[in-house]
């Protein structure tokens, strides 16, 4: 997981600004003070790795974000020559049988304007610090590998049993990835679930399609129904299991909807064509209705529940404005759900203005779903980073 992010010269953050992160982080506060910018520092990395990026470029415009030109993301109070800095501090734990491997450190990227294309940013430097591996037996081994014609890169050890082989590092470079591509993969930026505040409304029908390599609901929730249909029989994490019925995605989606709304169900109907139909009901009726006829809140919450249920340990879930169109009680129940998701080893970041979300997370700590150390609340009040 990421334990801290430092931003400098990025949008409103002129000076180096530090953001401590927890297993669950709530971003709240005044509008226009940098909450979205902090999330964008993660999403830009995910967006860049989704491209066939062999050129060490930061992609500013793509599926996740459209931020325009480089001069629109560089702080307006600094010179054109000064780079933008993104510094990510991490703490990864890998468990293999009776042994546990923990690695801590940071990766600092600096980007400048690309003189040939102002819609991307050019990587100028990657600095990796504090790369220490330690085992559960208290053995600690500083470890790094310098590659020819490249800056120092931290050796990634996805399998603890291969730690004994120093030559294993070179296997990771058999396809000759760029330093940006390699470090983005290593830090797992490709495994970010992102649900934006601008979610799609109810649709009369939904299209079936092939799931991407990294299954997700899409930034507007547009792939929720398709994913729910294709992964309906997938088993979810034991910690998120509700009720006495099957532990499958479709059943547990129904269970969590039922818990949050005091009675609700969801069904997805397929056909021989590429059309899918979503039907919902509330506690007031056993009949099924199209989303447009049952209330906007049901449709807005569905991508969040599905994302939380399919996310795996080590992945990241970012949710903007989860409270949209929800009754206060439903907001609180949803926050508790997200707290449970984070307890499964998924790092959750929430951007919200809701007191009900905040208070529910505090109750989650009281109920020991999360510890004090695992919850980080960041309040954005003034133009931080400009003083």
Image (spheres, rainbow, N blue to C red):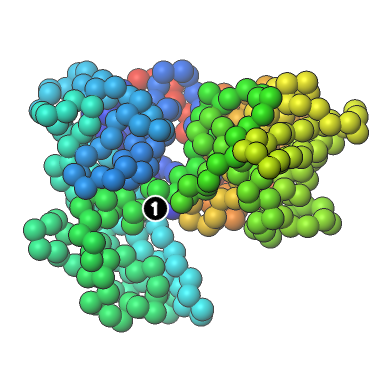
Q: In screen coordinates, is 324 left or right of 316?
A: right
Return the x and y of residue 266 as percentages of the image width and height: 77, 38
Q: Is residue 262 visible?
A: no
Picture mark count: 1
- Give 41 or 52, whichever is nearer the viewer: 52
Q: Residue at x 76, y 49 (%)?
A: 251
- Give 295 or 291, whichever is nearer the viewer: 291
**Element marked by disc 1:** loop
Residue marked by disc 1: 188
Up-down: is 183 above or below 207? below
Q: Quadrant of the C terminus?
A: top left
Residue 60, by quadrant, is top left
Return the x and y of residue 307 as percentages of the image width and height: 59, 43
Q: Is residue 127 visible?
A: yes
Q: Residue at x 47, y 19 (%)?
A: 30
Residue 291, by quadrant, is top right
Q: Residue at x 55, y 41 (%)?
A: 209
Return the x and y of residue 246 as percentages of the image width and height: 78, 57
Disc 1 crowd rating (10 Å Cα; few below 14, some 14-19, many 20+) is: some
Q: Which residue, as the protein is rendered here, is positioned at the far front?
A: 272
Q: In screen coordinates, is 193 left or right of 134?
A: right
């Amino acid at each position: 997981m990421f334990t801290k992010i430092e931003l400098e010269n990025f949008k409103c953050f002129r000076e180096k600004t530090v953001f401590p992160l927890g297993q669950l982080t709530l971003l709240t506060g005044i509008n226009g003070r940098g909450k979205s910018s902090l999330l964008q520092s993660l999403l830009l990395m995910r967006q860049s790795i989704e491209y066939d990026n062999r050129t060490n470029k930061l992609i500013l415009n793509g599926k996740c974000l459209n931020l325009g030109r480089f001069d629109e993301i560089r702080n307006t109070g600094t010179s054109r020559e000064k780079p933008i800095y993104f510094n990510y501090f991490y703490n990864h734990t890998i468990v293999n049988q009776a042994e546990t491997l923990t690695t801590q450190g940071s990766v600092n990227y600096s980007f400048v304007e690309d003189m040939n294309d102002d819609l991307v940013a050019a990587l100028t430097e990657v600095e990796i610090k504090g790369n220490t591996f330690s085992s559960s037996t208290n053995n600690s081994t500083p470890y790094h590998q310098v590659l020819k014609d490249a800056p120092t890169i931290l050796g990634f050890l996805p399998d603890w049993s291969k730690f004994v082989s120093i030559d294993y590092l070179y296997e990771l470079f058999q396809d000759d990835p760029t330093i940006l591509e390699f470090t983005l993969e290593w830090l797992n930026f490709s495994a970010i679930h992102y649900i934006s505040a601008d979610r799609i409304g109810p649709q009369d029908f939904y299209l079936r399609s092939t799931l991407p390599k990294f299954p997700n609901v899409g930034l507007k929730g547009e792939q929720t129904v398709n994913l729910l249909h294709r992964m309906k029989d997938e088993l979810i994490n034991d910690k998120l299991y509700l009720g006495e019925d099957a532990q499958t995605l479709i059943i547990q989606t129904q269970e969590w909807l039922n818990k949050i709304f005091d009675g609700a169900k969801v069904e997805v109907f397929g056909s021989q064509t590429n059309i899918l139909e979503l039907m919902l009901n509330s506690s007031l009726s056993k009949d099924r209705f199209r989303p447009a006829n049952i209330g906007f809140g049901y449709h807005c919450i569905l991508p969040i529940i599905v994302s939380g249920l399919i996310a795996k340990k080590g992945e990241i879930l970012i949710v903007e404005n989860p409270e949209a169109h929800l009754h206060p009680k439903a907001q609180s129940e949803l926050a508790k759900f997200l707290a449970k998701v984070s307890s499964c080893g998924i790092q959750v970041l929430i951007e919200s203005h809701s007191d009900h979300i905040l208070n529910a997370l505090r109750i989650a700590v009281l109920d020991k779903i999360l510890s004090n150390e695992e919850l980080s609340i960041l309040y954005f009040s003034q133009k931080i980073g400009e003083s």
